Image: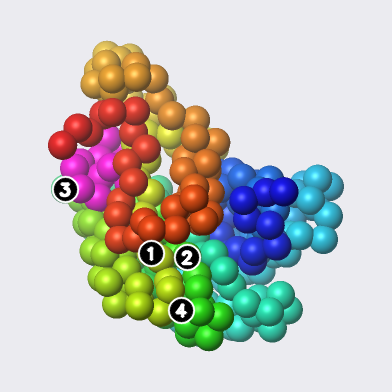
Amino acid sequence: MGKLEERVALVTGSAQGMGYVIARCLLEEGARVLINDVNQETIDRAVAELEKEFPGRVKGQKADVSNKAEVQAMIDTLCREWGTIDILVNNAGGSLHTPYKLEEIEEKHWDLVLNVNLKGAFFTCQAAIPYMVKAGRGTIINMSALAGHWRASLAGVQYTAAKAGVEGLTRQLAYDWGPQGIRVNAVAPTVTITGDRMKNLWEDKDQAERDKIVANIPLRRLSNPEEIGKAVVFLASDDASYITGITLDVVGGRYLR
């Protein structure tokens, strides 16, 4: 019996990379999971792969999380088909291939990163919370980053600003909706290699810089995606029933306050 048996989850940006791993970790604990992305082809591929191992417990839906109407339609459809939404994981985002040097960041880069990471999380929370209130329970996990309360290694100020906003959103929603039985937390990884984009960003740094980053991590290694996924499972499960409003650093001790 898994920790999330028969619970209904939405993981945004989950057709590949970190989101895919998180979705898989939730499925392994018994949840039903809606795979979301902006690319139908990657959604179809992810659902087909996961269906082989978790038949009947995976669906997919294309939606741009920065589009309020698409988000609302996605969550309405999910709740109509599966009855409710118990777990929302706001994973969609990242630096989205935007520059990290200040002088190269354009308004369109700033808007893209803030719209997907922060406004997207706001839209999904706004759409999901009424269903959670009706059910009398629910848990939201927002994917932040160490950059949200420290600094970034592979991204620019638009990313750090977006993730700082995600952490503020997390705290306020936890305070506002705790009385209705809804828990809201964030997970903050450090550098984690998931997919070609992160691999390329990491490999673009010279060896001395990569060595310096790893040397500043007490565990002396980067995380693997499954370690982040398991942290999400913990916060989504009843094991974390009295935890809300926190940002859980999954960083190997890199940031010690």
User: Is residue 112 covered in magenta?
Assistant: no
Nearest-to-viewer mark from 2 and 3 = 2
Amino acid type of the residue that numbered disc 3 sits on in the rendered structure: Glu
Amino acid type of the residue that numbered disc 2 sits on in the rendered structure: Thr
* Sequence-earlier tag: 4 or 3: 3
Vertical relation: 12 (above or below) 190: below
- Residue picked out by circle 3: 103
Amino acid type of the residue that numbered disc 4 sits on in the rendered structure: Ile
Is 46 on the left or on the right of 54, as rendered?
Answer: left
- Tell me which secondary structure the magenta stretch mostly adopts: loop
Magenta segment = 145-154
The alpha-carbon separation of the residues under discs 4 and 3 comes to 39 Å
- Residue picked out by circle 1: 184
Q: Residue at x 26, y 64 (%)?
A: 171
Quarter-of-image position of residue 116: bottom left
Contact between marks 1 and 2 (CB within 8 A): the answer is yes
- Residue picked out by circle 4: 129
The alpha-carbon separation of the residues under discs 3 and 1 comes to 36 Å
Is 92 on the left or on the right of 17, as rendered?
Answer: left
Q: Position of residue 95 (x, y in %)?
A: 36, 50
- Residue picked out by circle 2: 139
Is 99 on the left or on the right of 77, as rendered?
Answer: left
Q: Under tag 1, what secondary structure?
A: strand
Vertical relation: 83 (above or below) 146: below
* Sequence-earlier tag: 2 or 4: 4
* Sequence-earlier tag: 3 or 1: 3
